[in-house]
Image (spheres, rainbow, N blue to C red):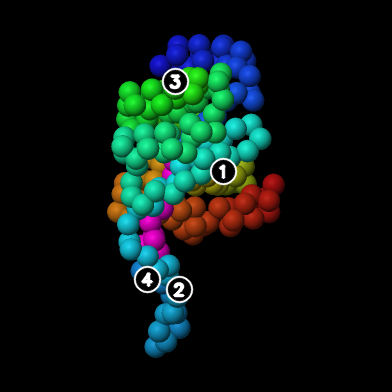
Amino acid sequence: MARRRARWRTHQHRFDPARLVFVDETWAKTNMTRTRGWSPRGAPLLAKVPQGHWKTLTFLAGLRHDRIVAPCVIDGPINGLSFTAWVSQFLAPTLSRGDIVLADNLGSHKGKPVRAALRAVGAKLFFLPAYSAAHVTPGIAEIETRLAALREGARHLAVGLDAPPNLAKWRETLRPRREASFLALDATQSATMLAGAAGFREGSGVARRAREATFVAIVSPSVKHIGHELSRVA
């Protein structure tokens, strides 16, 4: 996987940016709205929600270096049939001979009819190299390094527990506590980026860890309080 991505970076400068068309899709649901909230005691909670048929809407488009082409909304989730129809009816008419269409490795992008529709207008279809967690979230290596340093710092603090308290020891204790809060937030953000839409599902593991990470940062003493103490004893 790493070799493929390295090879891609080596050759990507050979492409004419004006010929590249990146295609992708995203989705939304009209029932993506909060079902609970806060209001004064005894008062009803009033809020607005979108009207709709409570189904998935998929938006597809191609991105050139200077504009978006073939925008389209499909009533339903993406699949091979709907993606092929979009390529044939919307994307292909906007292409010229020599254009290069770039897509990710989603299964619905890989049907033979898709490639045939693009070849019919003289365009080529390339797939982006597969990715891993380290490539999607470049900060993951940094997070692991910070975690190792935090663990080592905790071991160092444990060695001197019997020493008399002083300001230096107080600072050494506060800094790891604050770093642990920031590290939890950063790690959860990376996990959410990797999980994509699944990370925002209520009850999912990533969503649960996001709530827990936020709790670590705001539980007393919060990162704000710790920062104030560190500036006071500096």
* Lower sequence index among marks 3 and 4: 4
Question: Upstream in the sequence, badge 1 or badge 4?
Answer: 4
**CA gap, disc 2 and disc 3:** 47 Å
Q: Earlier in the sequence, mark 2 or mark 3?
A: 2
Say whether residue 32 is magenta: yes
Secondary structure, mark 1, is helix
Q: Which residue is identified by label 3? A: 119
**From what the image shows, is residue 117 above or below residue 29?**
above
Residue in the foreground of this view, choosing between 58 and 93: 93
Highlighted magenta segment, given as a residue range: 25-34
Mark toward the start of the polypeptide (1 vs 3): 3
Q: Which residue is the site of mark 1?
A: 175
Q: Position of residue 38 (x, y in %)?
A: 43, 75
Asked if residue 211 is positioned above or below residue 190 in the image, the reply reads: below
Residue at (57% x, 11% y) in the render: 10
Inspect this view and state whether residue 164 appears: no
Residue ID for mark 4: 36
Q: Nearer the viewer, residue 87 or 9?
A: 87
Packing grade of label 1 (10 A; few <14, some 14-19, many >=20) is: some
The mark closer to the camera, 1 or 4, is: 4
Q: Which mark is residue 49?
A: none
Q: Earlier in the sequence, mark 2 or mark 1?
A: 2
Residue identified by numbered label 2 = 48
Q: Amino acid at mark 2?
A: Lys
Spatial CA span between label 1 and label 3: 59 Å
